Image: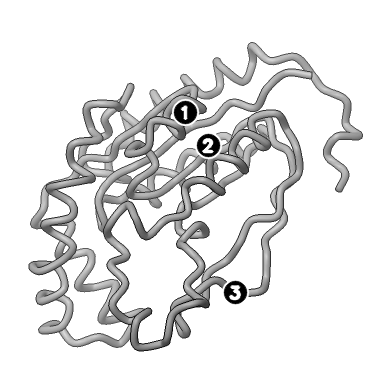
């Protein structure tokens, strides 16, 4: 049995990494390809009071349970089924529900900090950083938060200036040096996405067929 090909896609909030991921998956829909998001792995905070949970800085690497993330990614690499945690943003802690991830030949791992932890990087076959100018990222974040989260523009800008921007400069931007491929301007860069899809396809073609029974729970 061959190992799964792991593709890591990182970038700042509003960089367009989700758009890049979706376009790659659409182009490679004929492959046995899947997606796992780092946001599933926010730490369980059930031991904290609700007021304490509200102080969580979700833009800091410490917000993530990377020990569990690494453990699951190792299992995914070996094409094993895993039960991924989910997060309840209303109560700011891990939900009781889990998400079943079945074995795939290619797995995309997406998140702002997926290149920050060396243990995660070491499991990846291709590391991608989506690089988008700060002014575009903040505009996208404003539009998203106002539309999807019913937040005021004042609160969005305040959070961006006090938390998101400094965390990006300190922890996310430096991970660009670990990338094998840098995609400027996110999902609008069709050439970079086509090249990346071609590279993933070439890796996938090098793998041998595996026993279909492993795809059963």
Disc 1 crowd rating (10 Å Cα; few below 14, some 14-19, many 20+) is some
| Foreground residue among 89 and 62 | 62
Q: Residue at x 68, y 64 (%)?
A: 98
| Image disc number at residue 95 | 3
Residue 75 left/right relative to 158: right
x and y percentages locating residue 177 in the rendered image: 22, 27
What secondary structure is marked by label 3?
A: strand
Which residue matches tag 2?
A: 27
Identify the residue at image location x=54%, y=71%.
Answer: 94
- Packing grade of label 3 (10 A; few <14, some 14-19, many >=20) is some
Residue under circle 1? 197
Which color scheme does this rendered protein use? one colour
Q: Decide: marks 2, 1 in contact (CB < 8 A)?
A: yes
| Distance CA(mark 2)–CA(mark 1) | 7 Å
Residue 118 sits in which quadrant?
top left
Q: What residue sits 88% from the left and 25% below the top?
A: 211
Cα–Cα gap, marks 3 and 2:
32 Å
> Residue 96 has which mark?
none
CA distance separating discs 3 and 1: 34 Å
Query: Which one is earlier in the sequence, the residue at label 3 or at label 1?
Result: 3
Q: Residue at x 32, y 45 (%)?
A: 187
Outermost residue to the right: 213
Image position, residue 149 (x, y; %): 34, 82
Q: Nearer the viewer, mark 3 or mark 1?
A: 3
Measured as percent of width and height from the top left, residue 75 is found at 68, 36
């Amino acid at each position: 049995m061959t190992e799964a090909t792991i593709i890591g896609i990182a970038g700042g909030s509003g960089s367009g990494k989700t758009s890049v991921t979706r376009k790659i998956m659409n182009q490679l829909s004929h492959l046995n390809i899947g997606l796992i998001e780092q946001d599933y792995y926010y730490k369980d905070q059930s031991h904290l009071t609700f007021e304490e949970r509200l102080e969580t800085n979700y833009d800091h690497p410490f917000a993530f349970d990377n020990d569990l993330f690494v453990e699951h990614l190792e299992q995914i690499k070996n094409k094993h089924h895993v039960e991924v945690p989910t997060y309840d943003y209303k109560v700011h802690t891990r939900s009781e529900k889990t998400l079943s991830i079945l074995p795939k030949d290619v797995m995309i791992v997406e998140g702002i900090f997926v290149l920050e932890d060396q243990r995660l990087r070491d499991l990846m076959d291709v590391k991608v950083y989506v690089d988008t100018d700060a002014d575009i990222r903040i505009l996208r974040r404003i539009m998203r938060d106002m539309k999807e989260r019913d937040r005021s523009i004042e609160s969005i800008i305040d959070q961006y200036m006090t938390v998101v921007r400094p965390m990006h400069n300190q922890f996310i931007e430096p991970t660009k040096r670990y990338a094998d491929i840098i995609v400027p301007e996110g999902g609008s860069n069709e050439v970079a996405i086509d090249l990346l899809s071609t590279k993933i396809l070439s890796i996938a073609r090098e793998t041998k067929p595996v026993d279909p029974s492993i795809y059963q729970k």
